[in-house]
């Protein structure tokens, strides 16, 4: 299995438009964050986790020409607004997109032209598949959905093999921890340094989750410019916790 971090930024991305803080001005490429998305490659299949506004550029940048399934965590713009750009992947290949029922409905409402009875030529033919909390197969790969609370909004995280992807997380219901045992790699939301945000963990909350879940390694994602400079923040983290950055590739051990 290989995990590629296509984007590690929050909904505004980093740098943030109009901001001149030291992070937004940084020349370290690790401080430049596209919107959060991860590619999981396993058993010859490529599964995309979330498909945000930077999706097209993320595919071009990484040279990705084939996808086998897309999993969506929730309906927010920074996780679904790249769906129309899936078109080149749909020409030769029936790609399925998995999300919860309410997310499927939200996508149908937002992209009505893709779901009319008489389709305008060239619109994306999105094959949306509603899933619940039961494990399912995406392109033959077993996926375990995990309930995540994004503030008051219930959304999905996903476990594939010994990795789990938990983005946009503030808390986890007790029942979710059963699916998070024996992880090699946890990919976990940590928006910024302080923990006062209503729907995202800060770094100290993320570290508490890590203490409870006990994965071998954790990579933090969905960061805003308020996380601080990568070089400095990364040094202060425990040995098995890392700040992810765009383009980073990791493999379970
Ligand atoms: Zn800034
Ligand atoms: Zn969100
Ligand atoms: Zn988000």
Image (spheres, grey):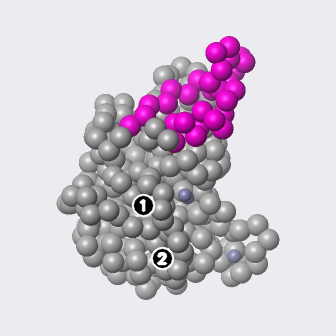
In the image, residue 184 sits, relative to residue 126, either above or below, namely: below
Q: Residue at x 58, y 40 (%)?
A: 106
Indicate which disc residue 7 carries.
Answer: none
Q: Is residue 130 above or below residue 230?
A: above
Question: In the rendered structure, does residue 116 fall within the stretch colored magenta?
Answer: yes
From this viewpoint, which residue is outermost toward the top? 118
Element type at marker 2?
loop
Q: Residues within 10 Å of mark 1 (few under 14, many from 20)?
A: many
Residues 199 and 158: in front is 199
Tell me where the magenta segment starts and ends, as one range: 103-131
* Above or below: residue 102 compared with residue 108: below
Task: Look at mark 1 in the image and give the residue it sits on.
Answer: 149
Q: Residue at x 56, y 28 (%)?
A: 126
Q: Looking at the rendering, which quadrant does residue 208 occupy?
A: bottom left
Q: Quadrant of the C terminus?
A: bottom left
Left/right placement of residue 40 relative to residue 1 reads right
Question: Quick one: SS at disc 1?
Answer: strand
Label 2: few (<14), some or many (≥20) within 10 Å?
many
**How far across and down, in percent of the image, does residue 226 sit?**
60, 78
- Label 2 CB sits under 8 Å from any ligand 3 atom: no
Q: Residue at x 69, y 26 (%)?
A: 113
The residue that mark 2 highlights is 202
Q: Is residue 22 visible?
A: yes
User: Quadrant for ligand 2?
Assistant: bottom right
> Does residue 252 appear left or right of residue 33 in this picture?
left
- Of the pair 141 and 117, the residue shown nearer to us: 117
């Amino acid at each position: 299995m290989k995990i590629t971090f296509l984007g590690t930024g929050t909904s505004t991305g980093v740098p943030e438009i109009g901001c001149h803080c030291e992070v937004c001005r940084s020349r370290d490429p690790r401080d430049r964050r596209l919107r959060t998305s991860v590619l999981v490659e396993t058993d010859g299949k490529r599964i995309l986790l979330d498909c945000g506004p930077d999706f097209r550029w993320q595919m071009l940048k990484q040279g990705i020409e084939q996808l086998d399934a897309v999993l969506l965590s929730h309906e927010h713009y920074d996780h679904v607004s790249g769906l129309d750009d899936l078109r080149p992947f749909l020409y030769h290949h029936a790609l399925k997109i998995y999300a919860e029922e309410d997310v499927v409905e939200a996508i149908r409402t937002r992209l009505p032209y893709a779901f009319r009875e008489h389709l305008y030529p060239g619109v994306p033919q999105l094959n949306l598949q509603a899933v619940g909390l039961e494990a399912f197969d995406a392109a033959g790969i077993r996926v375990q959905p995990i309930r995540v609370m994004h503030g008051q909004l219930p959304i999905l995280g996903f476990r594939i093999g010994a990795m789990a992807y938990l983005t946009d997380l503030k808390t986890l219901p007790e029942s979710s921890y059963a699916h998070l045992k024996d992880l090699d790699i946890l990919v976990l939301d940590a928006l910024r340094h302080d923990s006062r945000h209503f729907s995202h963990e800060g770094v100290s909350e993320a570290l508490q989750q890590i203490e409870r879940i006990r994965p071998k390694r954790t990579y933090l994602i969905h960061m805003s410019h308020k996380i601080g400079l990568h070089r400095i923040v990364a040094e202060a983290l425990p040995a098995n916790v890392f700040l992810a950055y765009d383009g980073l590739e990791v493999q379970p051990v």
